[in-house]
Image: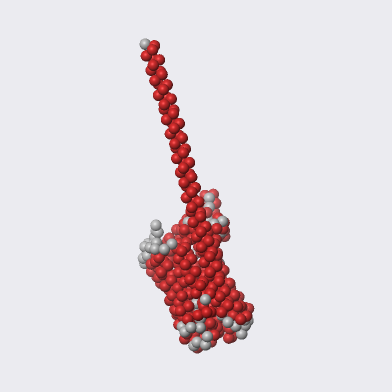
Amino acid sequence: MLYGSDIDKRWAWMVAMAVFLGKLTLSTSLYMSGVIYIALLEYYSDDDAKTSLIGSLNSGIMCLIGPFVSILIDATSCRTSMFIGGLLLSLSYVVSVFVDNINVLILTLGVIGGIANSMTSVPCCVILGYYFQKWRTTMISVSTCVVGLAMFISSPLALFLLANYELKGTFLLVGGINLHLCIFAFICRPSTEEIRLKQTKKTQCLKPQDDNRLSSPIFLMWETLARICNVKLFNNISFMLFLLSTTSWNFMASVCLMHLPNYVTTQGLPPSAITIIMTTFGVCNTLGRFLAAMCVAYNKIDSIKIHIGSLGILGGATLCFPFYGHLENACFVFAALAGLLTGIPNSAMTPISLKLVGIENLSSAHGLENFFCGIGIVVGPPIAGLSYEKTSSYTSSFMISGIVVLVGCVLGCMSMAFTEKVCIRNANDVDKTLTKRDETSSFIERVRLKDSLKERRQSDNSDVAKTSFV
């Protein structure tokens, strides 16, 4: 139960508005990467793989360092992490205005920007859980819709800024927009629940004689790191196979977000088509998340089967895209299908992890999920860009992405098979235990019966002896 006068009322609604606006701001700048990628190619005239690395690092590092940002939040607060991240993200764009070397831009906008994204996005997800109990599910669902809204407006906004202010002016304006994250962070003061839980964690980590270390952020960070790096999860074969499967659809999603705009350009379509295709991808992605959440919530379909089915259809459609991509409006249909089928496994991740590792390991599992998602996001766009550079066509890029997703589907099937095998083995162990228990119980009953008969016989003999004596 949550305690405090600020839960579900008063300032909580101001915090919710700040979080929604913060996620909208952050996600909009993230999903601009595909349109900005085209502008970077024209401005720097460098190879496709290196140029796409900027966007992939900007998004991928956000997931890769998620567990470490959780440590920072535990040591300080959600507001502190969000403020530092917003300031750093704004500076990464402003500094990029003065960068004329793409290698330096990889550092400023890719690495530093990715770190800043993570420091801002993680607290936005966590703080709603601290401020809401009754409305928690509703608030989290609305925040997911905000991400979909960001997908909807990011491409038109990026095209407008590039058309009117060019690349450097766009960097400066996006940096100014992201500076608003610092204002939203000030509104997100620590709730009574966040303060209480943080104090509880400190108390649980320390013995009574170590109370003088309660105020040490370094010690708390070390304890949190030890909790996140749960070695037992690496011995869970089913969970590790699922994580590798998760990497595959993130590979595909990042390729779509980064390269679909340029693919539209190579097909000779107008810039307005970029807006339509990316908006279609974003809307269908949000719809996929919602549909998967509904299926899981009402127990209509097993979450792992939803994951496997989505990857199977997505992998097949992507692998075959070069064969039907020449048809009219095929790219728009593909964008809708890719958006829907990368949104569905997104919502299924937490229920699957809960089934595979249990509630006691869910926080550690969530950190590993983010890490493996980040691997797919970082690796996908550069590989697709390198393939396009070598062949001057996106045919091989789509086929590689399709194969990766199909491999992920197979890994998901293996994960489900191992899970069922473990369940069967556990069921057999339970049956054997019950059988042994029944055998033991039967043996004990026979011994008791034998002892009872023996005592009765001795009693009868004693009575006979007494009667004889009389």
Q: Residue at x 53, y 56 (%)?
A: 214
- Above or below: residue 51 compared with residue 78: below
Image spot of residue 344 (x, y percent): 45, 69
Task: Name, please, the residue furthest toward the top.
Answer: 470
The quarter of the rendered structure image containing the C terminus is top left
Residue at 56% x, 75% y is: 399
Measuring from the top left, give residue 377's x and y in whole percent.
55, 71
Seen as rendered, the residue at the extreme front is 323
Say left or right for 247 vs 186.
right
Tell me where residue 387 sits by quadrant: bottom right
Instruction: Name which quarter of the figure residue 132 lies in.
Output: bottom left
- Residue at point 47% right, 47% down? 430
Quarter assignment of residue 388 = bottom right
Q: Residue at x 40, y 24 (%)?
A: 456
Q: Nearer the viewer, residue 206 or 287?
A: 287
Q: Nearer the viewer, residue 432 or 247?
A: 432
Query: Is residue 161 in sight in this rendering?
Result: no
Where is residue 57 drawn, in percent x and y? Answer: 57, 73
In the rendered view, would you say 84 is above or below 173?
above
